[in-house]
Amino acid sequence: MNKQSQWKSSTGFILASAGSAIGLGAMWKFPYMAGIYGGGAFLLMFLVFTIFVGLPLLMMEFTVGKMGKTYTTKIYEKLTKKKWLNIIGWNGNLAVFILFGFYSVIGGWIIIYILNVAFQIVTFSDNTLGSIKFESIIGNPWLTITGQGIFILLTMIIVMMGVEKGLEKASKFMMPLLFIFLIIIVIKSLSLEGSIEGLKYILQPRLKDISMEGVLFALGQSFFTLSLGTTGMITYASYASKEMTIKTSAVSIVGMNILVSILAGLAIFPAIAAFGYNPTEGPGLLFKVLPQVFDQMAYGQGFYFIFLILFLFAALTSSISLLELNVSNFTKNDNSKRKAIAIYASILVFIISIPATLSFSSLSGIQFGAGTIFDNMDFLVSNILMPLGALGTTLVVGQLLDKNDLKTHFGTDRFKLFMPWYYLIKFILPVVIVLIFVAQFI
Ligand code: PFF
């Protein structure tokens, strides 16, 4: 069989690409980045980048996928007749590969927390959620390696089942449920004594907190949450049916992502202030703070358990898009190879994820560049490979593709968005990405 898989409906496409976008980026990474880079100042920079850079780039990736309709290590050649431009697809492939490597570390933590809380529940343990000690969990190499192995295995099984059979149906109720849970956590968090300082921290932008590093990481965060520059979104759009609407899909995904990021911020920062945590805790922030919040609720263990399942679901809908990109590039639309490639890619990801997980235990002493091995993997992907990939695609779209052809695939243009979007991609965004990219090396 040699054909491009398709989603049956455009809702399927939106659900899957929203699933790819909304995951650990908004819920786990946004709060800890905002904690390090100035709270409200970071939120403001993130919003500006997401709306003015991320949204047009997402529309661009959808348009390219819809036009090219093939895997992303071929699509650039197909659209421009220049084979060497497929390097942009390979850059994306490398990015998701490394990304999956460190993403699975956090996925593994969620699984360990789920098992921990389940154990408390079934043994009617009087232990409170506050007894879950983050440091002793992530400091245990075998436990964390097992957790991430399970996460990768779950992802692999879902991808082996094929794209249209994925989690689309489930996400119709899992995602709204996740929103509801986030809102409950926000309410609880805001009701804690001393929470107001945290609320101010995340909502009040203080200009003095804006640093060049913060600007870079805010841009990286926009790329990360919207899965941009990896060509992951191009892959999903290449599976979509002709009826998919680029603007509506992109706007709704960006809107949901911003909403989840803000809700995560509102859930975490008031609690940080109330419990006296340091906002610059780093990657463990969410895992340290949330058990304390649920501990304050009636039936806290049960609610926390459900929340963790929803959180795992959101992480899985993102990780399947990471593996899916590798699978589609290596099967080259030949679905008979799907299972074998999913297995090989997962084994390789598992191997590279081991140093990432050990960055929190036995290899924590190895520090260079952006920090630990884990930090460097994240930096390489979010701040280098993703912006480079997005830059490459803006250059292809703005300089090489036919404007009328783009316009046709952009779809009906009731609000006359095509021309501003096109000029943004052609002239402004490449310059913005280059400037910010170069700034980090100065
Ligand atoms: N956007 C995902 C998240 O925020 O968790 C991460 C991601 C998924 C990035 C897929 C890139 C990608 F291709």
Image (cartoon, rainbow, N blue to C red):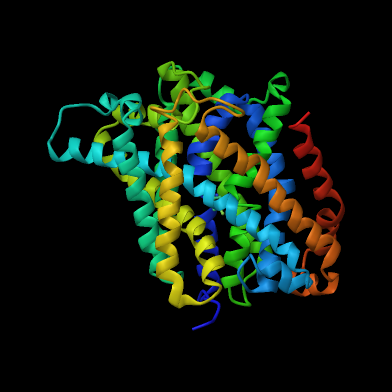
Q: Is residue 312 visible?
A: yes
Q: Quadrant of the C terminus?
A: top right
Residue at the extreme left of the image, as rendered: 123
- Based on the displayed image, in which of its 4 quarters is residue 412 positioned? bottom right
Tell me: 427 left or right of 351.
right
Q: Is residue 172 visible?
A: no
Q: Position of residue 379 (x, y in %)?
A: 60, 37
- Based on the displayed image, in which of its 4 quarters is residue 217 positioned? top right
Q: Front-most of 59 and 65?
A: 65
**Residue drawn 63% across the image and 33% down it:** 43
Q: Position of residue 273 (x, y in %)?
A: 47, 19
Instruction: In the rendered view, tell whether residue 255 sits above or below residue 184.
Output: below
**Residue drawn 39% across the image and 59% down it:** 156
Q: Position of residue 198 (x, y in %)?
A: 52, 22
Q: Position of residue 98 (x, y in %)?
A: 53, 47
**Residue drawn 59% across the image and 50% down it:** 95
In the rendered picture of this protein, how many numbered marks are placed on residues? 0
Instruction: In the rendered view, tell whether residue 421 sits above or below residue 357.
Output: below
- Based on the displayed image, in which of its 4 quarters is residue 393 positioned? bottom right
Residue at the extreme bottom of the image, as rendered: 1
Q: Front-most of 399 and 175?
A: 399
